[in-house]
Image (tube, helix red, strand yellow):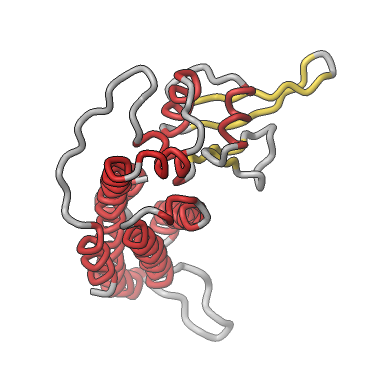
Amino acid sequence: MAYDFDALKARVRDISYTPGTDALRHVSPLLFQAQDLTATALVRLTALDNSTYTNIAGSRASLELLASVVSSSSLAGADLAHVVLANPYEGAQFAGYLADDEAVRTVRHAEAIPKMNGHLDDAVHQLDLCAIGCHYLAHGITEDLTSAQEHNPAAVQQTAGPALTPTQYDALTALNGGGRLYESTTRGLGVTRVATDDGTRVSIATFRALAKRGLVIRDTRTSLVIGQKITVTEQGQQALARPCPHAALRTAVATPPKAAVAVAVAQGAHR
């Protein structure tokens, strides 16, 4: 998710628009994406809160940090909505009022642009906090699991559940980069398939095994014909943070304590 927040931040920061219809056309997709990322962060917070990871020391800080990401993402969406509100529209006046001439329109645009840019800057700030929070969260969960394994390997195995097979691990890695579940009709029969953004082949049996363990979820609000977005849950992120079945886990970089990051993100969200 950190990369999604970074990508959206770059789009908001680099937006180019002309007040009016053009601005609405450019800002609307950004607002939709911010709302989608807020929903995704909330789904992952719920999954993490319902997981056995909460039995591990340090998990509360992870929950608080992810909650701060939900808050900052929501605030970024609100900032983009304020851009929509500050945007000067060109609809006709009530009967009896003079229509705006070019000079009046120029003044309205000149007054609106600083307000709109201010809201865009605020959105960039909130999205930056989201990306930072997600990066630290991923490292923090890895550190928690590693620390718990050193002190109580049996408890970590119980928290983690059965180890992933190499095929499942590769599928989960591919789906973490983006994927969708589709259904098509062949000779009158419905055929369900998984498509990943990087082209990795994932069988429907492997997907169902991952879904049964709560490692992935799909957006059932969307038709299978269009394609239901597949999201790796926080439990899935934890599974990816553990050693790969066929490769050694790379050494994690040192990061600040999650509690300190959560406080920093929360404080930044209210600046």
- Residue 96 horizontal side relative to residue 103, left or right: right
The quarter holding residue 170 reads top left
The answer to whether residue 16 is seen in the rendering is no
* Spot occupied by residue 62 in the image (x, y as percentages of width and height): 34, 57
The extreme bottom residue here reads 96
Between residue 97 and residue 78, name the one nearer to us.
78
* Spot occupied by residue 81 in the image (x, y as percentages of width and height): 42, 66
- Residue 14 horizontal side relative to residue 55, left or right: left
The quarter holding residue 87 reads bottom left
Image quadrant in which the N terminus is located = top left
Q: Eyeballing the image, is 165 above or below 225?
A: above
The extreme top residue here reads 187
Between residue 4 and residue 163, name the one nearer to us.
163
The answer to whether residue 92 is seen in the rendering is yes
- Residue 91 horizontal side relative to residue 264, left or right: right
* Spot occupied by residue 107 in the image (x, y as percentages of width and height): 29, 74
Between residue 219 and residue 264, name the one nearer to us.
264
Q: How many marks?
A: 0
Q: Residue at x 30, y 42 (%)?
A: 142
Image quadrant in which the C terminus is located = bottom left
Q: Eyeballing the image, is 51 above or below 19?
A: above
Q: Residue at x 49, y 18 (%)?
A: 167
Q: Residue at x 35, y 34 (%)?
A: 242
Q: Eyeballing the image, is 22 above or below 86?
A: above
Q: Residue at x 63, y 23 (%)?
A: 204
* Spot occupied by residue 97 in the image (x, y as percentages of width and height): 50, 84
The quarter holding residue 126 reads bottom left
- Residue 237 horizontal side relative to residue 16, left or right: right
